[in-house]
Amino acid sequence: MNQTKTTSVNVSLGDRSYPVHIGQDLLGRGDLMLPALVGDQVAIITNTTIASLEGGCYLESVRGCFANQKVDVYDQLPDGEQHKSFANYQAILDFLMQRRHNRSTTLVALGGGVVGDLTGFVAATFQRGVGFVQIPTTLLAQVDSSVGGKTAINHPAGKNMVGAFYQPSAVLADIDVLNTLPLREYTAGLAEVIKYGVIEDPDFFAWCEANSAALAERDPQALIHAVKRSVEVKAAVVAEDEREQGRRAILNYGHTFGHAVEMLTGYTRYLHGEAVALGMVAAAQLSAVQGRVTPDVVERLIDLLKAVGLPVAFPADLSEDAVLDAMGMDKKVLDGRQRFIVADSIGSVQVDDAVTSMQLRSAIAQAVLSK
């Protein structure tokens, strides 16, 4: 067991603070997981892909940390965003009740964002709240969805419409597991990494530009830095605004457009990170339409997204009317007014709830032409 390659970031939320451990060889680190347990019951929730991967090696490594606990494993969750559903939420609740789990149990989410979001919502609602540990196995989940306490399932009318703010007691981000991710899944996660540079840290954005090849090639040291800096930015924002009453909204840069694309394409054409990349381009184009940024800022973002293999051209087969209608159902609508995150520069964004339909149509049209 290698304990020399670990760094940690603390999410500061008073008595609900928790560590995010980042490094290599973490899945078998009982010393990092055991302090996060509530009692002697553990339920590991994972999907069929993780359970079958290389003979279940990831699952067995995690399970081996709990030699003195009663452990149950739910490994029947299908892989894919469309399975973050009411049906699977109930299936996990049924499993916990059948196995007689109680308020002293701890749920361990082993998987990507779907597993983490779904397991987190179960943890928030089962027995009015039980222990919860995140072990994200995708880059996107490591830098975004596993940190900050947003848990949810999808509704036919929109993504993440049913959920709760519920913080984990620990997060373990083992970058070694990223080596087994399919290229497309890995690349999708880089969208969220790049987002943190856009919203908060121009130096990190420049670092991503300079290290785009290393990131695309999954260089371990580049990944540790990228994950750590991403988590640091998100942790600071969450500590300031846990329930998205203000500043936390900047974390949604590109997501309003991206969620609309996901919903209109049935959550099957694009991975979440790919949709976020498209959404960031549209948001950048909106910022340019408003005169907030110059075209070269938009081009920097497009060039970086392309350099790591992400899509940049908004889907031309989605009508502007359909996109606008889909965004009207987005959960970020506040008091009947749609909020958009717009950029004033690389590293500085703000919330704008006075965006006009004409501006949106122009931004979408420009995003379709991005190349």
Image (cartoon, rainbow, N blue to C red):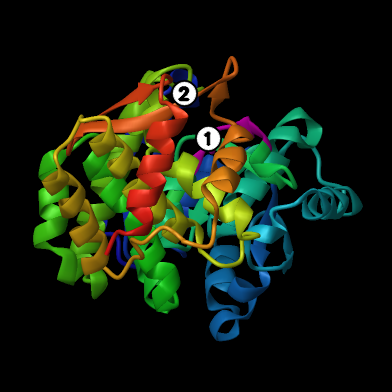
Residue drawn at x 61%, y 75% is: 49
Q: Residues within 10 Å of mark 2 (few under 14, many from 20)?
A: many
* Residue under pointer 2: 242
Please state the horizontal and vertical placement of residue 250, each as a whole percent of the image: 36, 30
Residue sitting nearer the eye, 77 or 131: 77
Q: Dot 2 lies on which element?
A: loop
Kindly report the distance in space between the C-alpha atoms of the residues bearing marks 1 and 2.
Answer: 8 Å
- Quarter of the image for the N terminus: give it: bottom left
Please state the horizontal and vertical placement of residue 215, each as a whole percent of the image: 22, 66
Q: Quadrant of residue 44?
A: bottom right
Q: Quadrant of residue 128?
A: top right
Which tag, 1 or 2, sits closer to the chain's start? 1
Please state the horizontal and vertical placement of residue 16, each as a whole percent of the image: 50, 25
| Residue with the most extreme bottom position | 54
Q: Is residue 17 visible?
A: yes
Q: Residue type at mark 1?
A: Gly
| Mark carried by residue 178 | none
Q: Residue type at mark 2?
A: Glu
Task: Based on the picture, tell me whether residue 164 belongs to the magenta stretch.
Answer: yes
Position of residue 72 in the picture relative to residue 13 (left or right): right
Q: Is residue 297 above or below residue 291?
A: below
Q: Is residue 84 above or below residue 252?
A: below
Q: Are marks 1 and 2 in contact (CB under 8 Å)?
A: yes
- Quarter of the image for the C terminus: give it: bottom left
Residue sitting nearer the eye, 3 or 271: 271
Residue drawn at x 29%, y 59% is: 370
Position of residue 309 in the picture relative to residue 244 (left or right): left
Please state the horizontal and vertical placement of residue 194, each as a whole percent of the image: 27, 51
Q: Residues within 10 Å of mark 1 (few under 14, many from 20)?
A: many
The span picked out in magenta is 162-170
| Mark carried by residue 149 | 1
Position of residue 168 in the picture relative to residue 189 (left or right): right
